[in-house]
Image: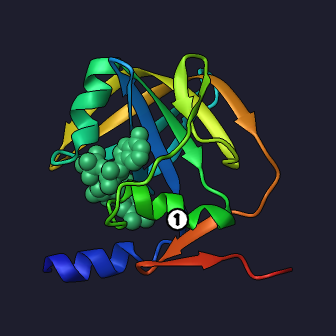
């Protein structure tokens, strides 16, 4: 099995798109991630998987907190900005939820405290204890087979 085959197989799993954000010494850092999952209801836990080469890894280690922002269909540009797919630096305005930076107008803003970090292969799984949540009603941005998609109408 080669890397291409593995990527192709994983790309067949349609997901939403999130931006993970954290703040260190007043500097906010965001990163696009679709490796996100709900883990437990009691206590309320989520997980994100961060590549060892991502700047985000050290930043979450330092801050001990992060947010997961579930993107709406009209936030594709934010996904591209935080995946490093936009050449020119763009200013992005954040707000705060429970002291953690969150993206305005996301479908869900989930503010977390790191409860555990597990290194697995070339990624680190951060388990986040959910401290606060804000939700908005809108349509989700979808990622499937390496492309952004929208939900078809019912
Ligand atoms: P950088 O590459 O340093 O930053 C990413 C970009 O965000 C840069 O262009 C930077 O300028 C910009 N940025 C950061 N903070 C700010 C700010 N405050 N204001 C404005 N711009 C800012 N990687 C994973 O590890 N796990 C995943 O689950 C994952 N899922 C992905 C899903 C999708 C749909 C895509 C497209 C990519 C995914 N990636 C994932 C890859 C990851 O998003 C990129 O590799 C990313 O560039 C790595 O981020 P970094 O922390 O190294 O930050």
Q: Residue at x 32, y 39 (%)?
A: 125
37 lies left or right of 59: right
Q: Residue at x 64, y 30 (%)?
A: 41
Q: Residue at x 75, y 40 (%)?
A: 135
Quarter the C terminus occupies: bottom right
Q: How is the image coloured?
A: rainbow
Q: Nearer the viewer, residue 91 or 67?
A: 91
**What residue is pinned by disc 1?**
77
Q: Nearer the viewer, residue 11 or 33?
A: 33
Please count the marks in the image: 1
List x then y, in percent, for residue 52. 17, 45
- The residue carrying mark 1 has its beta carbon less than 8 Å from ligand 1: no
Q: Is residue 97 visible?
A: yes
Q: Is residue 48 visible?
A: no
Is disc 1 placed on a helix, strand or loop? helix
Q: Is residue 29 above or below residue 122?
A: above
Quarter the N terminus occupies: bottom left
Q: Residue at x 39, y 25 (%)?
A: 23
List x then y, in percent, for residue 63. 34, 19
Q: Alpha-carbon neighbours of circle 1 within 10 Å: few (<14), some, or many (≥20)?
A: few
Q: Residue furthest right?
A: 154
- Residue 136, quarter of picture: top right
List x then y, in percent, for residue 118. 26, 32
List x then y, in percent, for residue 34. 45, 57
Q: Is residue 17 above or below residue 92?
A: below
Q: Is residue 37 above or below residue 15?
A: above
């Amino acid at each position: 099995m080669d890397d291409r085959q593995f990527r192709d197989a994983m790309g067949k799993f349609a997901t939403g798109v999130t931006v993970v954000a954290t703040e260190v010494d007043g500097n906010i850092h965001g990163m696009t991630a679709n490796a996100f999952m709900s883990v437990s209801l009691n206590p309320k836990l989520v997980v994100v998987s961060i590549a060892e080469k991502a700047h985000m890894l050290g930043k979450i280690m330092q801050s001990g907190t992060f947010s997961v922002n579930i993107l709406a269909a009209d936030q594709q540009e934010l996904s591209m900005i935080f995946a490093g797919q936009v050449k020119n630096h763009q200013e992005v305005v954040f707000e705060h939820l429970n002291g953690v930076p969150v993206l305005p107008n996301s479908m869900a803003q989930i503010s977390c405290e790191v409860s555990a970090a597990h290194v697995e292969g070339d990624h680190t799984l951060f388990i986040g204890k959910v401290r606060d949540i804000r939700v908005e009603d809108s349509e989700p941005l979808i990622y499937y087979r390496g492309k952004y998609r929208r939900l078809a109408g019912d």
